[in-house]
Amino acid sequence: MISDKFASSWINNLQRFKPLILKPFVVKMWLLSAHKAQLSAVLVLVFVLAVAPSACGALADALYPPPAQSLGKRIVKVFAPNVSHKHPLRDARYQTFLTASYGLFALPLWLLLQHLAPTLQRARAQSENYKKLALIAPDPETKQQLLQTALRYSVDALPSVKQGHATVIRDTYADQSQSPTLIHPDTQSLQATAIGDNQRYQVVKALASGGAGVVYQALDTRLKRQVAIKQLLTHNAENAAMVARFREEAHSLANLNHPHIIAIFDLLEHDNQLWMVMELMLGGTLADKIRVKGFFNFSCAIDLLIDIADGLAAAHGNNIVHRDIKPENILFTDKGVAKISDFGIAKSAAQITQTQHGLVLGSPGYMSPEQAAGQSTDSRSDIYALGITLFEMLTGELPFIGSTTQVLTKHITQPAPLLSSLRYETPVSVDRLLQKMLAKEPEQRYQSITELQSALNMIQIELGTRA
């Protein structure tokens, strides 16, 4: 009976590790939270490798010295120098002491296990929180983003998805290397059709759907290249504001020519619908990479942020403020080059000063305080959103979570958590960089993207990245 209870208890304990085997992201959360265990492991390792053998040998010699040698033994030693005259128990006790020193590894392991249950509990709570937010999401795109985040934290069942008029038809949630793709039912009839004059663009397949439009992969038969085509959904085509926003995105991209901004090739009307032909990006989004990796190391994050800042500098140089910088809008080519996309709510500096107060556009999780309050925004709002993006890259989560109203309120009233409080190895320069990027008052942030680039370049040199 006792052995059965012991076996049952052992099996139950092993079951606690199952989520960690299935969810690498939760493993990273667990290890990251166990700072004392990490420090203990390093100290014990140094002791065992550098100190333990000599210390154990000295202890064994002290406790078990060689016996006093008689005249006969000294004569034997002269003619047989290889004969050992150590205490017969000395070597056995030395091995015992050394084995006991190796057993010190149980200390960091025990400390590590103390963080297991709280980590799993926190991961489950985060997953449930994001799934609840997805139920009240205002549009399918936001719902998709919230469910992707819920999946990262999920350590039990995978979240089910129902999108109302849009459904997930490619359920790839079990595959951590892929992101779920939302396909609107209206798009199914467009498979293998042609768009444009002389049927120039042959639709290959639908890639993804958001609240405003659907993106397809297509073949440009005239130039013999693969492109992406974004269609404004039928129910949005009758909305004058959505049409204007769609055209604004095309105009913004047309005025920008930069290696870190997605290129636009054409804007056309077909069957009374608007279509935007763009550069095809097959490397996924930054949100996908964060979901898979959990969080970036500091050098990779800074390198990537420099590329994004270069693209933003080109936009700001043309008096265009993006206003919706977030990981979902950072796309990658198949060669890993990052490019900014989705300029749908971008505005010129002149237009922003005339924006109606109280009108809130953007993604709540990444909004600057002034944008969340419905006030006028400028390039410093993009710097704030870029800071939130960097925070997510380095921690795997957003600094503020909750309902939309709660998140907007936190952006306005609460400081973001210190990065060093979540990752103890955070360089001081990176901590200061984020604090300045996420300052509540625009006057306390970097005043231009150029100033931010200078700070990033200094940190890049400090971290020794990109020789």
Image: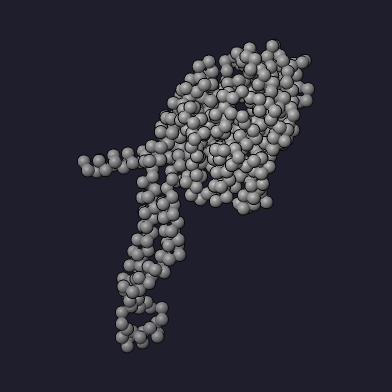
Q: Residue furthest left?
A: 1
Q: Where is residue 400 drawn, in percent x and y?
A: 49, 35
The residue sitting at 72% across, 25% down in the picture is 251
Report the side of 389 relative to 79 (left or right). right
Q: Residue at x 32, y 39 (%)?
A: 12
Q: Is residue 116 left or right of residue 1?
A: right
Q: Quadrant of residue 373?
A: top right
Q: Is residue 388 visible?
A: yes
Q: Is residue 386 visible?
A: no
The residue at 69%/38% (across/down) is 313
Q: Nearer the viewer, residue 291 or 427?
A: 427
- Quarter where residue 178 is shown: top right
**Nearer to me, 463 or 334:** 463
329 and 419: which is toward the camera: 419
Please identify the quadrant where the N terminus is shown.
Answer: top left
Where residue 398 sits in the image (x, y, percent)? 51, 36
- Against 195, residue 399 (above or below) is below
- Left or right of 346 in this view: 418: left
Left or right of 332? Residue 405 is left
Coordinates of residue 336 in the picture (x, y in percent): 65, 38
